[in-house]
Image (cartoon, rainbow, N blue to C red):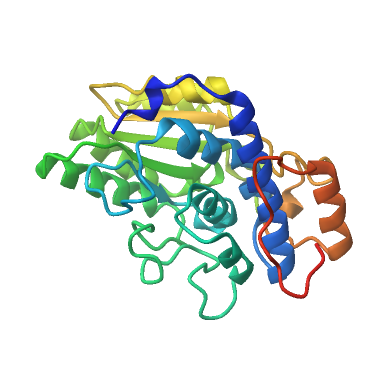
Amino acid sequence: MESLTERAVDVVRLQEMARQIRRDTIRMVAHAGSGHPGGALGAADIFSVLYGHSMSHDPSRPAWADRDRIVLSNGHICAAWYSVLSLCGYLERDELATFRILGSRLQGHPAREKLPELVETSSGPLGQGVPVANGIALAKRLDAQRGRVYCIVGDGELHEGIVWESAMTAAHYGLSNVTLIVSDNGLQIDGPVSRVKNVEPIEAKFESFGWHAVRVDGHDLSALARAFASASADKPTVIVATTVMSKGVPFMENDAAWHGKCPTPEEARRALETLGTAQEYEDFEMPGDDV
């Protein structure tokens, strides 16, 4: 299969995809009455570039051995991930309306038991995705499989010691097929990361552990694509993507309260009006809801 990184970056299409991811996130969380919209909205551009350009994947073969893998360590932002999976054809669009409903495949944190071909590991405890990504990368090497393992974390998640143990492990084994993406929005549930426990300088810390580190604007689609393409062939890579919590919805942006706050129906309507429609995509059916 042709590497998606060889194609020109279609910024307009990726912008439309990111816009729809944000629309879906608002509608899903509002309909469920619970969820974590802030980080999901902030990571929409990352998901758009990964699935729309940089990753090697094939919706017609979800279990393809040589595919790139995603480990969503900060699983609470999964509304954005479920959205992009539906936009790529891995999920039916209407299934998004079941988000966080008891028994649904689309749980509030990704559950491997529910989606075994899409979810590499169930997530919830922060930091756990990084060692799992290392394990998948090692298995790929042992099985002579192609494909990169992407792991997404939040900057507040860097408080977890297991992240740094895993950083040592990845460097020790020369896991050049690992790319860690830090969505660095400067906020976590208790407020500014710098006040709760400062994690900067992130790039220098990873470099001291033996990683290739790149800082990028997490909302610049072309820059994100270049950053993903710049992954080292000799060592693990970390992409530190500067993002804005709740990006795209001004009254929600840069407010830590939206880490896990559900918008009211009126707030959801305001957010959707601000986001506008994505011409290339349609909203999924939401029974009994006009949002």
Residue farthest to the bottom, as pictured: 102
Identified at 73% across, 53% down, the residue is: 258
Residue 260: x and y in percent read 68, 59
Q: Nearer the viewer, residue 2 or 141?
A: 2
Identified at 75% across, 54% down, the residue is: 257
In this rendering, would 3 be left or right of 111?
left
Residue 102: x and y in percent read 56, 80
Q: Nearer the viewer, residue 113 or 288?
A: 288
Q: Residue 123, located in which quarter of the rendered image?
A: bottom left
Residue 27: x and y in percent read 72, 59
Q: Quadrant of the N terminus?
A: top left
In this rendering, would 120 be left or right of 184?
left
In this rendering, would 140 be left or right of 181?
left
Residue 136: x and y in percent read 24, 48
Residue 96 is at least partly visible in this image: yes
Seen in the picture, residue 189 relative to 286 is either above or below; the reply is above
Q: Quadrant of the C terminus?
A: bottom right
Identified at 17% across, 47% down, the residue is: 139
Residue 259 is at least partly visible in this image: no
Identified at 63% across, 39% down, the residue is: 18
**Total residue callouts:** 0
In this rendering, would 109 be left or right of 113?
right
Seen in the picture, residue 118 relative to 95 is either above or below; the reply is above
